[in-house]
Amino acid sequence: MLTPENWKIAEPKDDKLRLMVLVDTEEEFDWSLPHSRQNTGIRAMGAQEKAHRIFEKYNIVPIYVCDYPVVSQEDGVRPLQELYADGLCEIGAHLHPWVNPPHNEDVNNFNSYPGNLPASLEKEKLRILTQTIEDRFNKTPKVYKAGRYGVGADTTATLEALGYEIDTSVLPWTNQSSQQGPDFSLCGTKPYWFGSSHNMCEIPMSIDFAGLLGRSRRSSYDLLNNPAGRALHLPGIFARLRLMDRITLTPEGISWQEHRRLTKAMLSRGCQTFSFTYHSPSLMPGNTPYVGSPSELGFFLDRFERYFDFFFGELGGVPATPIEIRDSLKRV
């Protein structure tokens, strides 16, 4: 999944620009504290309609990739069941190992990445999550996103065995190995086919570099982001000077002007598929670092509309689900 010899870039069948909206649908917890099995609150699920008022305006059908605390508790799953029954969303899987049975591992940073677990344990946790989603929605999920983007050496085989068709875990040009996570340094922003028969589709997150040095991407950024560069605040300086700015297509801490810059940079490199992502707890103030008050929530949701106006209006793009994106790509 992570190295070029295991995948093939997927070219679109047409020249349309497609936007997927994907929501990491999970429990609330303090991101600054260690992981805990006791963090299973799902109050924010009742606030998801705030975003749906916007989605319906633009005919967007988002996909909620759900973890175990959400789909195993009535108050978590009921709002999604109502949306799903009305055809207003799709459902996928999102594995947070520390709150997903079986609880056979120690809770620590290394084990918070699903792909770091023994293959049998990663598979059993995802099997239980998959079955719970199927029981709740009467449909087997086909789209997966690893918690903390934590895919590993055995994740592809696990996804194939459990019937998944699409993965959305990849963070382009990003190396998480210093935090005990995966290394996506060789992965770009375009979708690709992977798996034993190249029948699985990867739709990476939309994250790339804008600015005059943006095309040099990882090589230049690695020089800026080494310990000496960080000590001199070089990544921030280069971003402010519009020389090299690493941007993610998310409303969480990213302005709509940055969204626009990122999209234009990706377009200049031939990208036609874009993924707009955020975390479900952000829709209830106080749950994430990005939305601390009702006024911040207003600014947060305003970024949705400003970007959608730009993408669908100025660029003439269309909304798409992960399945629709996969079907829009040429087979190898």
Image (cartoon, rainbow, N blue to C red):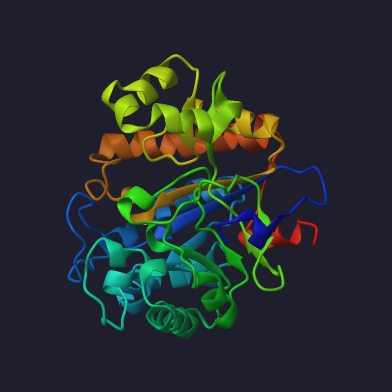
Question: What is the x, y in percent for residue 326?
Answer: 70, 60
Relative depth, front residue between 28 and 148: 148
On the question of residue 255 being in view, the answer is: no
Residue at the spot x=44%, y=14% of the render?
241
Residue at the spot x=38%, y=52% of the render?
177
Question: What is the x, y in percent for residue 200?
Answer: 66, 68
Total of numbered circles in the picture? 0
Left or right: 49 with respect to 308? left
State the image quarter where residue 2 is shown.
bottom right
On the question of residue 247 being in view, the answer is: yes
Relative depth, front residue between 234 and 36: 234
Q: Is residue 220 above or below residue 114?
A: above
State the image quarter where residue 196 is shown.
bottom right
Q: Is residue 174 above or below residue 141?
A: above
Question: What is the x, y in percent for residue 150?
Answer: 41, 61
Question: What is the x, y in percent for residue 192?
Answer: 67, 56
Residue at the spot x=55%, y=32% of the render?
217
